[in-house]
Image: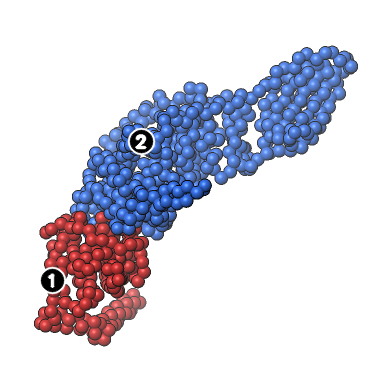
Chain colours: A blue, B red
Amino acid sequence: MRGTAAIAFTLLLLLLASLPQAQGTAPATPLTLLSRDGRRQVPTIVLSGQELIALDEVASLFQVAVREDTLAGGLTITYRGRTIVVSSDQPMASVSGRVVALPSPAVRSGNRWFVPLDFLPRALAPIYDTRIDLRRASRLLVVGDLRVPRVTARVEVPGPPTRATLEIAPAAPVSVTTEPGRLVIRVDADALDAALPGDGAGLIDLIRFGDQPTTIVVLLDDRAGPARAVPAEANGITRVTIDVTGVAAPGDAAAAPPPAAPPTAAAPALAPPLFATPRTPLQTIVIDPGHGGDDRGARGARGTEEKAVTLEVARRLRTLIEMRLGIRVILTRDDDRTISLDERAAVANNSKADLFLSLHMNAASVAAVAGAEVFYVRLDREGEDARRAAESGVPLQVLGGAMRAIDVIQWDLAQARHVDASAVLAGILEQDLRAQVPMGGRPRQDAPLRVLTGVNMPAALIEMAYLTNGEQERLAQSEAYQSSLAQAMYNAVVGFRSYLDSQRTP
Amino acid sequence: MKRRTYLQIGAGIVVIGLLAWAVSRGLERLAGLQPESGAAETGTTAAAASVPRITATLYYGSADGQSLVPVRREVPLAEGLVPQGREIVGAQLQEAPSPFVSVIPEGTTLRAFYVTDRGDAFVDLSPEASSRHPGGSSTELLTVYAIVNAVTANLPTIQRVQILIDGREADTLAGHVDLRRPLQQDLSLVREP
């Protein structure tokens, strides 16, 4: 009884909490989604001058997965392994690692999240398999390869005689039917993106859509006599010239009044500059979620798999870095698949990353062992040789006959020249992790770790917790703990960036 | 009535199955495993009596699971570097004595042991070393360096050790420690008991 009352009270509270936020008005003309499957209306709201669409609506329309990331203050939208992160406090989104400006941040209204309509063409379109085209003027959202030419109609000379033109771009075949009191112009297309004048002039009362979305009707005035429409194609545009003469006064070739200024479509607002921050020594970061696919990694007593936890934390960390620092982040895998250690290093080297973080979960033969540990590379004798070779450089003859010292290094010992920076990175990581999570017995070590040896940039491997410890396994599954780990590593990235800055400006 | 018959038939099958298992186990003991276990038994008993033994330092996981602990143990003396190395690694792969914990995956055996002219030892382990490894960088380091340290600590002419799995060069045991090159001794993981 008491329980029911409590639930009812909670529901009431939730309802009340959601009420004041649920503002936003419907737009004057609904947005129409146009695809091969036909057309349908898409609900949107207008909130402080900005047209927004609900993310759950986007999810169902485009089959994308939406996930809220409370820590980063953002939302992650996934489509076939590609990811968009939308910020809730800055007007931008990160699309597969590239930052895109939006007119406003994501907005929560009630229990729904809304994004500006521009999210569709700017953020979703680049990663979507089929074309997404937002035609603002005609309130059309075109999905897929549909022929939707723009149609501009205007009365050039009110007359009488009255002359109007219909411009169809790109060009499309047109057929004209003359009916009593009107002309029907049928365009061979899937739909029309038409900006039609509100009313006519002279002998034309009105130019409007016909019964079908691909027909345009020119309604003639009572005083109108013979009318004709002649299509002609030039420069990829079909121009239909409509001439209407009066019944009583033919041949009255009065001087044409100056034609009305052609309505020009408002040019889309240019995207604001992406980032005002100065160039940073950290442009690209590669995060490597350890294991994956057939390689499950370590496993806890309750069945928690290392490969799943590392991916979760990597995604959180990516969101944080992209949203707050605007640094490009690449994951070596963004789903559950098997990739070799060499491929992971290749992703980092090929993207010319400035930092490489490999995320792992630890295991021990004694259940009591717990805590996070940070590793950086240790290279034995061969690594030392490689490092010396890289430092001294090999004299090679260059074009023109001069000799120049060229840095050469064995490709699989690329880490040799970054050992010092990696040690600093590991120190920063240890310090920032310690502030957030318990540390292990050996919080920072150097070791010959395979995934680190081949990466040509400062790199560290973080064993975030022990899955063989019951308490840590439980924590590893919790969103809060994953967020703490991501936050700690994010702080370390910021710290390492400052270190790099200090190195650059002596 | 019918139900009872089924029950009786079922019980009969179970009894026959148990008998067959017992007989096969007995035969295995008599035939299949006889030479090996016999050799081992005679080996140990003979060793206790006559085979000379040396004291070697082997490395086991500490009771808290965080370090390697050097433990002095007797292993049979063998003639020559390679046979002695074989004895040492063989002993290192055995289960850890209490209170220490084993850092070698259960079932791991030594397939081969050889030494190159450069003084690098190759330790060829059975696939269990990789397939049964629980994973985690820390544990993998303990596994690898228990073997590397055992070889280098007891055979001073050997500077570096490369671990092979099932006769082939391996990337790692479980995705962490680089096994593509011979490794030097690392005592940073070792804690005196």
* For residue B128, above or below residue A218: below
At a point 37% along the width and 38% down the height, the residue shown is A320
Task: State the image quarter where residue A386 is shown.
Answer: bottom left
At a point 50% along the width and 27% down the height, the residue shown is A272
The lab-note entry on whether marks 2 and 1 share a chain reads no
Q: Secondary structure at mark 2?
A: helix
Residue A54 at x, y = what percent? 48, 33
Tell whether label 1 touches label 2 (CB within 8 Å).
Answer: no
Q: Hey, what amino acid is under mark 1?
A: Thr
**Subunit of mark 1?**
B
**Subunit of mark 2?**
A
Label 2 to label 1: alpha-carbon separation: 56 Å
Residue A44 at x, y = what percent? 52, 30
Q: Residue furthest left?
A: B49
* For residue A15, above or below residue B55: above
Residue B172 at x, y = what percent? 33, 61
Say which quadrant the C terminus of chain A sits in: top left
Q: Secondary structure at mark 1?
A: strand
Left or right: where A132 falls relative to B131: right
Q: Dot 2 corresponds to which residue?
A: A504
Task: State the image quarter where residue A240 is shown.
Answer: top right
Is residue A193 visible in the rendered image? The answer is yes
Please tell me which residue lies in front, A430 or B149: B149
At a point 82% along the width and 30% down the height, the residue shown is A230
Left or right: where A36 falls relative to A335: right
Residue A216 at x, y = what percent? 73, 30
Q: Dot 1 corresponds to which residue?
A: B55
Left or right: where A210 falls relative to A331: right
Q: Hey, what amino acid is under mark 2?
A: Arg
Number of residues whose C-alpha sits closer than 10 Å to that of mark 2, classed few (under 14), some (14–19) or many (20 or more): few
